[in-house]
């Protein structure tokens, strides 16, 4: 059996990371020996009695900033436990957007180190000296980097062979080809007057796939049209999308002519 994919998280709240690893796909990946997640607390690298990891920002302003010395020492201690070539990432609002493509990239690395900041931010020298890149999980403000780090770990774990109950799941997930997912249904067939689309009950797998693609296209066009410009579609899917868009445009023209 191959060695587990190793992740190190530098965090002031190790229990926050450990608790999430007990459940769902993450828990399964850990228990099956596919994923190993360890933590390093910057407080362990302080030298004063109060274990100080933050200080007031130079230049004034609200909040506190994480100090460079303990944070960088924690990063280096965690890095020493990872295979050479592992990627070091600071979870940061200033970073590049996290995506499914980036999750795949991380999953192919020898290992991954995630730095979860707190307070008003981290000393800029941490970004300069201690990490390879900065990554953001969205345009909003959180209290710290632990939840973003767990988001990255969860997305990565799904890509590890054997982590999912059905390996087709990570192929058909939203964003895998750059499109949103299609609607899903299960029993009962009718609930409060709302029925499962008949095509899903037909047993015609080619027709079901066409319906699902059309639904994925519709959702992406209506909800996240910007995804289409950078979608990495298989040739068959690209042809189906072009046909769908052409038919949609023709339908809109017909409705315009009838008004």
Image (spheres, grey):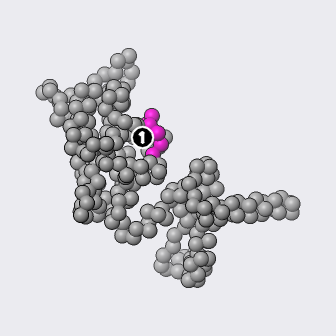
Quarter of the image holding residue 36? bottom left
Residue 83 position, x and y percent, is: 26, 45
Residue drawn at the location 61% of the way across and 52% of the way down: 228
Residue 79 locus on image (x, y percent): 25, 40
Vertical side of 110 occupied by 34: above or below = below
Q: Is residue 196 left or right of residue 2?
A: right
User: Percent x, y for residue 85?
Assistant: 31, 42
Q: On the rendered structure, is 224 left or right of 45?
A: right
Residue at 17% from the left image edge and 35% from the top image edge: 44
Q: Quadrant of residue 195?
A: bottom right
The residue identified by callout 1 is 135
Q: Quadrant of residue 160?
A: bottom left
- Please identify the quadrant where the C terminus is shown: bottom right
Q: Nearer the viewer, residue 235 or 215?
A: 235
**Overall secondary structure of the magenta stretch?**
strand
Residue 97 falls inside the magenta stretch: yes
Q: Nearer the viewer, residue 242 or 182?
A: 242
The magenta segment: 92-98
């Amino acid at each position: 059996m191959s060695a587990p994919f190793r992740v190190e998280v530098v965090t002031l709240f190790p229990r926050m990371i450990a608790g999430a690893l007990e459940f769902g796909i993450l828990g399964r990946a850990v228990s099956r020996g596919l994923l190993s997640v360890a933590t390093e607390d910057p407080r362990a690298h302080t030298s004063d009695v109060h274990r100080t990891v933050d200080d007031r920002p130079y230049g004034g302003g609200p909040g506190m900033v994480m100090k460079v010395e303990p944070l960088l020492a924690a990063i280096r201690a965690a890095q020493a436990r990872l295979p050479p070539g592992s990627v070091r990432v600071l979870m940061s609002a200033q970073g590049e957007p996290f995506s499914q493509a980036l999750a795949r990239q991380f999953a192919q690395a020898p290992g991954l180190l995630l730095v979860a900041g707190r307070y008003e931010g981290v000393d800029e020298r941490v970004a300069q000296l201690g990490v390879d890149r900065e990554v953001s999980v969205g345009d909003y403000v959180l209290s710290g980097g632990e939840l973003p780090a767990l988001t990255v770990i969860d997305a990565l774990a799904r890509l590890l062979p054997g982590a999912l109950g059905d390996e087709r799941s990570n192929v058909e997930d939203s964003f895998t080809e750059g499109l949103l997912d299609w609607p899903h249904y299960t029993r009962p067939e009718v609930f409060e007057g709302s029925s499962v689309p008949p095509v899903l009950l037909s047993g015609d797998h080619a027709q079901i796939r066409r319906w699902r693609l059309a639904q994925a296209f519709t959702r992406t066009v209506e909800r996240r049209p910007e995804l289409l410009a950078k979608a990495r579609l298989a040739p068959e899917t690209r042809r189906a999308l072009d046909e769908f868009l052409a038919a949609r445009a023709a339908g809109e023209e017909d409705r315009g002519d009838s008004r």
